[in-house]
Amino acid sequence: MSERSSQVIDQLRAHLEYYLEMGIDRVHSRVKAGAVRLAVTGRTRSKSESSNSGKGSKDSRQTILFTDSRPVPNQDSSLEDVRHDLGDCERCKLCQGRTHIVFGSGNPQAALAFVGEGPGADEDREGLPFIGRAGQLLTKMIEAIQLRRDQVYICNVVKCRPPQNRTPEEDEIVACLPFLLRQLAVVQPKVICCLGVTAAQTLLQVKTPISQLRATVHTFQGAQVIATYHPAYLLRNPSAKRKVWEDLKKIRSILSPDHLGN
């Protein structure tokens, strides 16, 4: 066996062992392929390769990332533990173009968590999630159900901005997923609102379109999950706001009065 092959195997083993520690013991075959690519490329992917990454296939946002719905073991005492382990992350190619890692913000004991797709330009510049135009709309959505931003928790599937705000690719989601799962395990929200197709399909392990996912209240790690359209989509399609309001009313009906208006 060549030295290069041995290095690849060692990197792949370390990558998969990390998932086992998170309680994920089975993964989709395409994710295994993504892990292999991640191990092979590592930090050596050139900028020229990164510039072509925006041409990822449509299937990259339809990958079933794991098949075990058991709760993730909560080995973290706080979100600070998760952020510390994330460090100055270079686990995927998104690190090459970022300004800041956008980890998450809000109440670490929130009853309601919002999960989006990934940071945009404003978020990358400031290091905070949902602070641009879409974030301003999200704030209005939160206030519409009698909550404030500081009462909820907000994060994204990937923590670094994809170039030109493209959809995160398979290997990027695979690299970030353990940290998202750990965030949710620490917060333990009663309700998770998935903003957009990437967040919904990632957490719910499905390929179903967001238009169909909206019709059902789902479950994930003991939380009830509502899927709805991303605020950025609403900025382009204002007519969908009525549908999102229906989804927000579902969230409001699930949360007890104790969680509202405090």
Image (cartoon, rainbow, N blue to C red):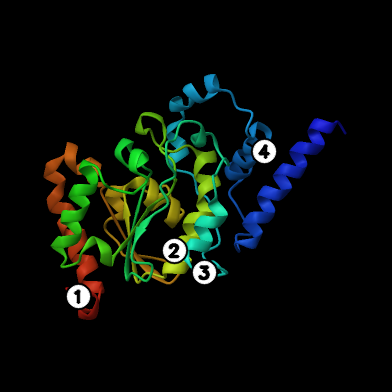
Q: Amino acid at mark 3?
A: Pro
- How far apart marks 3 and 4 lie (CA) works out to 27 Å
- Residue type at mark 4 is Ala
Q: Position of residue 235 (x, y in %)?
A: 17, 40
Q: Are marks 1 and 2 in contact (CB under 8 Å)?
A: no
Q: Secondary structure at mark 4?
A: helix
Q: Which residue is mark 1?
A: 262
Given contact means CB atoms under 8 Å apart, are the residues at marks 2 and 4 in contact? no
State the CA–CA distance, disc 1 to disc 2. 22 Å
Q: Determine whether label 3 and label 2 are within 8 Å by CB.
A: no
Q: Residue at x 19, y 66 (%)?
A: 147
Work out which quarter of the rendered image holds the C terminus and state it: bottom left
Disc 3 crowd, CA 10 A, few/some/many (<14, 14-19, 20+): some
The residue indicated by pointer 2 is 184
Q: Is residue 190 left or right of residue 37?
A: left
Closest to the observer, 208 or 131: 131
Residue that numbered label 3 is attached to: 71
Q: Amino acid at mark 1?
A: Asn
- The residue at which mark 4 appears reads as 39
Q: Tell me how far mark 3 sits from mark 2, CA to CA.
A: 10 Å
Mark 2: which amino acid?
A: Leu
Q: Position of residue 141 (x, y in %)?
A: 18, 56
The first of marks 1 and 4 along the sequence is 4
Q: Residue 26 in the image: state x and y as whole percent.
A: 62, 56
Whole-number angstrom distance, CA of label 1 to CA of label 3: 29 Å
Q: Identify the image quadrant of the N terminus.
A: top right
Q: Tell me whether circle 1 and circle 3 mark residues in contact (CB < 8 Å).
A: no
Secondary structure state at the residue bearing disc 3: loop
State which mark lies toward you, 1 or 2.
Answer: 1
Between discs 1 and 2, the one toward the N terminus:
2
